[in-house]
Image (tube, grey):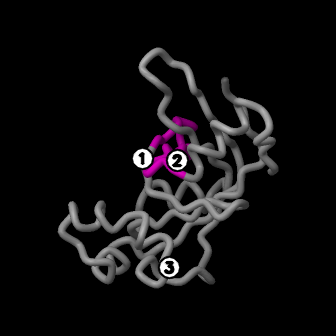
Amino acid sequence: MEIDTSTDFGARAAGHLAGDLVVWLITVGSDQTPQPSPVWFLWDGDTALIYSQPGTPKLRNIERTGRVSLHFNSDTYGNDVVVMTGNAWVDSDTPPGNEVPAYVAKYADGMQSLGMPPEAFAQAYSVPIRVRPTSLRGH
């Protein structure tokens, strides 16, 4: 999915992907109920890298359907809406979070607030997920 950053909406979407610390990952449970989870992510221009604790409902949902959406918080009045839908998978080829320098740099303060050095974070959140958006909408 390419984002047209020459438009106001595209520029805002790209700004969220580059600068926001949290995105909502929405999976669908076996009962067809949406399951939102706030997650940390690293955007590489094509996919979002997310780390999860093992055995979570979001992992089971991703393994079952592979379809997800990502959305950012809007402003107070419901403007600046950015929603992406796409495909997700567990990416066993991705190194642990503590071995991804850009991820550690982005979330160093967050890891510290959890009382976890990067190595402990990587042990606890040991399952790498990739999300490749296929569509983008919002206003």
Residue at 60%, 60% in the rendered image: 43
Residue under the point 58% across and 80% down: 94
Residue placed most toward the observer, 91 or 21: 21
Q: Nearer the viewer, residue 124 or 71?
A: 71
The residue lying at 51 percent from left, 61 percent from top is: 59
Percent x, y for residue 119?
32, 83
Residue neighbourhood size for the residue with mark 2, other residues' Cα within 10 Å, grouped as few (<14), some (14–19), many (≥20) = many
Which residue is the site of mark 3? 100
71 to the left or right of 7: left
The CA span between labels 3 and 2 is 21 Å
Using a 10 Å C-alpha cutoff, classify the residue at mark 1 as few (fewer than 14 neighbours), some (14 to 19) or many (20 or more): some
Picture layout, residue 134 above or below residue 109: above
- Outermost front residue: 6
* 3D distance between C-alphas at marks 1 and 2: 6 Å
Q: Which residues are magenta?
A: 19-36
Q: Observer-nearest residue: 128 or 78?
A: 78
Which residue lies under the disc numbered 1? 38
Residue at image point 60% right, 62% down = 63
35 shown above or below 48: above
